[in-house]
Amino acid sequence: MVSGRYLVKAPRAPGAFPLLAGFHGYGQTAEHQLDLLDRIPGSDRWIRCSIEALHPFMNDRGDAGASWMTTRDRELRIVENVAYVDAVLGRLLDSSLSSGTVVLHGFSQGAGMACRAAVLGCHRVSAVMLVGGDVPPELEWLEPMRSVHLARGDRDRLYTQERFAGDRERLRGAGVAVAETVFRGGHGPEAGYFAAAGCFLAGVA
């Protein structure tokens, strides 16, 4: 039996709120992504959910981390991951706190998971936010992503300008609305990213 782990923060005011669900990068944890979501201006008006990957491991420093994908049984892992995310989102959407609006956010390896959840999952999303990670090449039907905030650091050696431009054209070719941001920095989000992400999120809500 495999169990998953996720963290949730909700606005303190009464009412129903949109859901911002995030997926962390390789070797990170739910805490890392929740901190990232909290740093987006205006996210305190959303239910923030950080979903931790199903494949935990210890890194070279002895710290706990997790991965969304393995090279073995890749197609089976994708099915398992999507079903897991569907279950988490379903539980939150069925709660009295949810307004029904869903935005998915992915960093690095988590960007691929955000795309798969939007395209292969059972819950309709309003938008997807991707930073430092690409759209999985095996996804052919991208229309369910609807609107995408696509971002990279100008010194990011992992998610290169070429991959960024390729994803932008793939999405636009599928009829997906794309807002692009290139911020000063490397692989991880910096101040310029958070400012742009906040503006995009405000436009969705």
Image (spheres, rainbow, N blue to C red):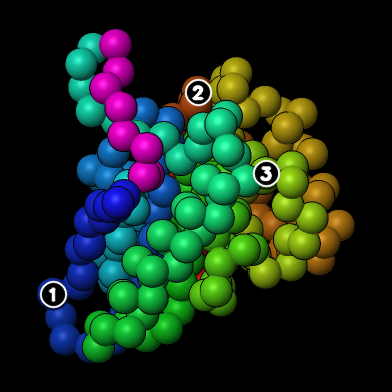
Amino acid at dot 1: Arg
- Res 45 → quadrant: bottom left
**Label ID, residue 186:** 2
Q: Are marks 1 and 2 in contact (CB under 8 Å)?
A: no
Disc 3 crowd rating (10 Å Cα; few below 14, some 14-19, many 20+) is some
Q: Which type of secondary structure does the marked residue at label 3 adopt?
A: loop
Between disc 3 and disc 2, the foreground one is 3
Q: Residue at x 76, y 28 (%)?
A: 162
Amino acid at dot 3: Pro
The C terminus lies in which quarter of the figure?
bottom left
x and y, in percent, of residue 103 in the image: 48, 66
> Which span of residues is magenta-colored?
53-60
**Label ID, residue 12:** 1
Q: Which residue is mark 3?
A: 136
Q: Is residue 69 left or right of residue 22?
A: right
- Res 8 → quadrant: bottom left
Q: Which residue extends farthest front? A: 1
Disc 2 crowd rating (10 Å Cα; few below 14, some 14-19, many 20+) is some
Q: CA distance from mark 3 to mark 1?
A: 36 Å
Question: In terms of depth relative to the viewer, which is nearer, 190 or 12?
Answer: 12
x and y, in percent, of residue 56 in the image: 31, 34
Upstream in the sequence, badge 1 or badge 2? 1
